[in-house]
Amino acid sequence: MLLPAQALGGVPRQAQRASNRQPPLRQQARQEPTPDTHTNHSPNPCTGNTPETPGRCKHWARFAIQLYPIRRNQTALLQTAIGVGRVVAYGLVAELPELGQVSHRAIAALVGLAPVRCESGDWVGRARVRGGRPRVRRLLYQAAVVASTHDGRWRAVYAELLGRGKVKKVAFCAVAR
């Protein structure tokens, strides 16, 4: 004996037909959310589409750094470098807890700025930077761009690398390292 769909806990036929008339999920995803239906379920206070998000984000990052005096000292020390501002310093301290505890070569490898050679037997490939933490790499790259345009010492290093025939992006990665 067949039971109706409602008795089995299923969906009645009228509801099934109505759901078939709904646009597919891809079409729903393409539609832009309206302001009254958009909700933010993220626990991170730095995300969302509210007007006070930037101020809240700055306050939250400052509060997180001020909790630990060692981190505060690290950010102050990092900000003394040319090209490293508050955002880059906070990002480095937050994303790279090994900073100050391991060598500069290990940090370059962790970030993904250390050149890795691809060799096998007699075959010699090109050294490339890869792997690591992309957020930190982006921060250091931006700091290198600023340093190579505003600081004479880093500008000379950058110009020397370009003079040797390096690509601009490779030269910026070398300055970041």
Image: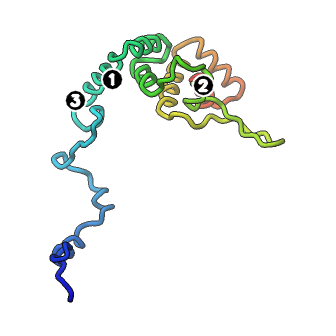
Which residue is located at x 30 percent, y 56 percent?
29
Task: Assess whether mark 2 and mark 1 are in contact (beta carbons under 8 angstroms).
Answer: no
Q: Quadrant of residue 61?
A: top left
Along the viewing direction, whichever of 65 and 48 lies nearer the viewer: 65
Colour convention of the picture? rainbow
Q: Amino acid at mark 1?
A: Ala
Q: Amino acid at mark 3?
A: Glu
Q: Measured along the vertical axis of the image, is residue 20 above or below residue 166? A: below
Q: Position of residue 127 (x, y in %)?
A: 70, 35
Residue position for label 3: 52
Instruction: State which tag comes first along the sequence, 1 or 2.
Output: 1
Along the viewing direction, whichever of 49 and 119 lies nearer the viewer: 119
**Secondary structure type for disc 2:** helix
Task: Assess whether mark 3 and mark 2 are in contact (beta carbons under 8 angstroms).
Answer: no
**Secondary structure type for disc 3:** loop
Q: Measured along the vertical axis of the image, is residue 93 above or below residue 3? A: above
Q: Which residue is at the far right?
A: 122
Q: Position of residue 91 (x, y in %)?
A: 42, 25
Which residue is located at x 60 percent, y 37 percent?
130
Q: Quadrant of residue 160?
A: top right
Residue position for label 1: 61
**Secondary structure type for disc 1:** helix
Residue 106 tag number: 2
